[in-house]
Amino acid sequence: MYASKKRFLERLTPRMPAMKFGKTIDGTSPPSVFVGRMGYPKVFVGPLVTELKGDTFEMDTPEAWIGKSKMNIVNFRMQLARGMEQVKITEVDNKTVEKMREIALASGTVDANAEFAKQPRGYSFNEDHQPFGPSAPLKSMEISNVRWDHQMEKAHSDTDMKAGMAMAELYEKGVLVSQIQKALSVGAFGIKRKLVPTRWSITAVDDTLGKNLLDSVRNYPVLDRYLVYEFAALENYFVILLMPTQWQYEFLEVFLGVMGQQEMIFTDWEPFGGRTKYAGMGGCYYSVRLAVAEKLEEMKKQAGAIVFRESYPSYTPLGVWLCRESARRSLRAQTKEFNDMNSALSYIANKVQTPFWKYRKSSVLMKQSRISSFC
């Protein structure tokens, strides 16, 4: 399913006016780095830099983007140019990689002067990572005003701590998920360190943190009612249903009226014990699961969860962060309580634009015997 979804979303890349950069940029990195996956185990690594100076931290902090318009996000992301140097994933001591690590572990904006081998061109939009502007081979780069995040520095210095443990400890101490993802991508954690392509590091962090939370959630008492949360932003509508069952999770997403098609539906799910294979929907599955697990941990309750996402005709892929942060915002909104499954599903059916029978047909959890009588 992931391959078909990937091909579908690649067709949604908007046409943008070319951003013009010279061969030299004297500005800042928000901080931001990018590790590609093409050519793996050799990958292209480099910074994202902008001509803007001052505090540009928010340009690569997706936790702060909900509430901004799509064009606002696209506009400031297109002002980031990507430098590229090809290295092996094991070359964590490469000079450019070391500078990338300095940037990734920084607590704030880093001053940067980057020289490219040629004028940067193009742009990138993807469901798996945040968009960015033109790219070009990196000739040289100097950075200054680097102040490492104290917690990040401790995790990086501990070469006996596994990467998963480092991620969990940083998260518990309040480090942003997006910061942990960047640090993992440049080989900052673990015993045997290596570079991790950005899109893989994003999902690895969401998956690892979600699993850690669910280890606790599975031991909490089961929720005693049906709860519905909802939130809309950036041409997306999320509805999250929490059910009085043991942990089980399903994510159903529908792209409506996109590319002239009536709808495209993608789904995936997991039982109480979790998954053994990568979710066919891609990284959004894990980003939303993390948000749901965070809410259940906060409530000290166990529940089943069905998540409905609708993306409307003007939707533009902006990255996995959109699903995680929209789900988080949804779960912070005022909840609606229901005494039975039928009432909860009836409410949701009246809110979504997709005929609800199509959700039921695609769903695994709504067909299970324990809840099928309500559907």
Image (tube, helix red, strand yellow):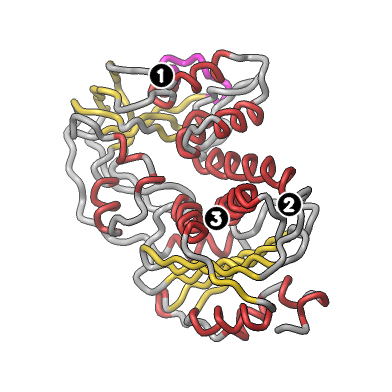
Q: Alpha carbon of mark 2 to alpha carbon of mark 1: how far?
A: 36 Å
Residue marked by disc 1: 148
Q: Horizontal and vertical percent for residue 317?
A: 41, 58
- The kind of residue on which mark 2 rests is Lys
Disc 3 on helix, strand or loop?
helix
Q: Horizontal and vertical percent for residue 228?
A: 57, 69
Disc 2 on helix, strand or loop?
loop
Which quadrant of the rendered structure holds the N terminus? bottom right
Does label 1 or label 3 sit earlier along the sequence?
1
The span picked out in magenta is 88-98
Inspect the magenta stretch and tell me whether residue 112 lies in it.
Answer: no
Q: Alpha carbon of mark 1 to alpha carbon of mark 3: how far?
A: 29 Å
Q: Horizontal and vertical percent for residue 292?
A: 60, 55
Q: Is residue 294 left or right of residue 233?
A: right
Which quadrant of the rendered structure holds the C terminus? bottom right
- The kind of residue on which mark 1 rests is Trp
Residue sitting at 50 percent across and 14 percent down? Answer: 93
Above or below residue 167? Residue 345 is below
Residue marked by disc 2: 277
Residue marked by disc 3: 284
Q: Alpha carbon of mark 2 to alpha carbon of mark 3: how far?
A: 15 Å
51 or 149: which is nearer to us?
A: 149
Inspect the magenta stretch and tell me whether residue 95 lies in it.
Answer: yes
Q: Crowdedness of circle 3 by 10 Å Cα count: few (<14), some, many (20+)?
A: many
The answer to whether the residue labelled 2 contacts the one labelled 1, judged by CB atoms less than 8 Å apart, is no
Between marks 2 and 3 in the image, the one whose residue lies nearer the viewer: 3
- The kind of residue on which mark 3 rests is Cys
* Residue 134 visible to an observer of this rendering: yes
Does label 2 or label 3 sit earlier along the sequence?
2
Between marks 2 and 1 in the image, the one whose residue lies nearer the viewer: 1
Residue sitting at 18 percent across and 34 percent down? Answer: 52
Above or below residue 83? Residue 333 is below
